[in-house]
Image (cartoon, rainbow, N blue to C red):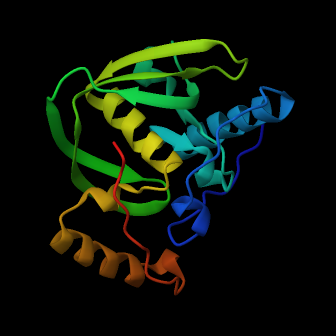
Amino acid sequence: MTVLPITLIGDPVLRTPAAPVTDFDAELHKLVADLTETLADRRGAGLAAPQLGVGLRVFALAPQLSDGKFDHLVNPVLEFPDEEVQDGPEGCLSIPGIYLDTVRRQNVVAKGYTRHGDPIQLVGAGMLARCVQHETDHLDGVLFIDRQSPERRERLLTTIREAAWSDGMPAPEVRLSPH
């Protein structure tokens, strides 16, 4: 396991839809371990493979979100059992220091696989549902800033361009989530 650097907004890998995992092999096991270790080191809630520069459909979640029952998902597919929404603060390790209220679905059913290729289903609400949606957006090349109003998004993009960590990166593009 290795703690790896987080890919920051502006890197094309964050805007490229990730490829499905087809090989449940030692390389995938290492990726899940690296995601888990890096997430724990950064004390985040979730971390997707593109945030480590890897274009595969895998993410890790902080185990406390699911009472230790769930810490990663491979090839997730989301379903929403109802129309209920939540609006609350959200941040992203790839956009350091930015937190904004973001509308998400309140409840989610996520189906996918473990790193061993075993089918898994996660039913979540509240923060767990928010995290699963946020990380799945990463796998689709979508960032939480894309879910903001146009006015708020423009102010945010200006703030990002002026951030010390941005190092003169080009203006990030905006995308719509398929979820």
Q: Is residue 68 visible?
A: no
> Does residue 132 appear in the picture of this structure?
yes
Classify the position of the C terminus by image quarter: top left
Snapshot quadrant of residue 124: top left
Q: In the displayed image of the protein, which residue is found farthest to the bottom?
A: 168
Q: In the displayed image of the protein, which residue is found farthest to the right? A: 26
**Residue 22: x percent and y percent?**
74, 32
The quarter of the rendered structure image containing the N terminus is: top right
Q: Position of residue 47 (x, y in %)?
A: 54, 43
**Spot occupied by residue 91 in the image (x, y as percentages of width and height):** 36, 52
Among the 4 quarters of the image, the one containing residue 23:
top right
- In the rendering, at what x and y percent does residue 97 appear? 38, 62
Q: Is residue 171 depicted above or below 11 in this figure?
A: below
Residue at (76, 43) in percent of width and height: 2
Residue placed most toward the observer, 22 or 48: 22
Q: Note whether 132 is above or below 154 in the view shown.
A: above
Residue appearing at x 61%, y 61% in the figure: 13
Figure disc tally: 0
Task: Give left or right: position of 83 versus 158.
Answer: left
Question: Which residue: 43% across, 18% down?
Answer: 66
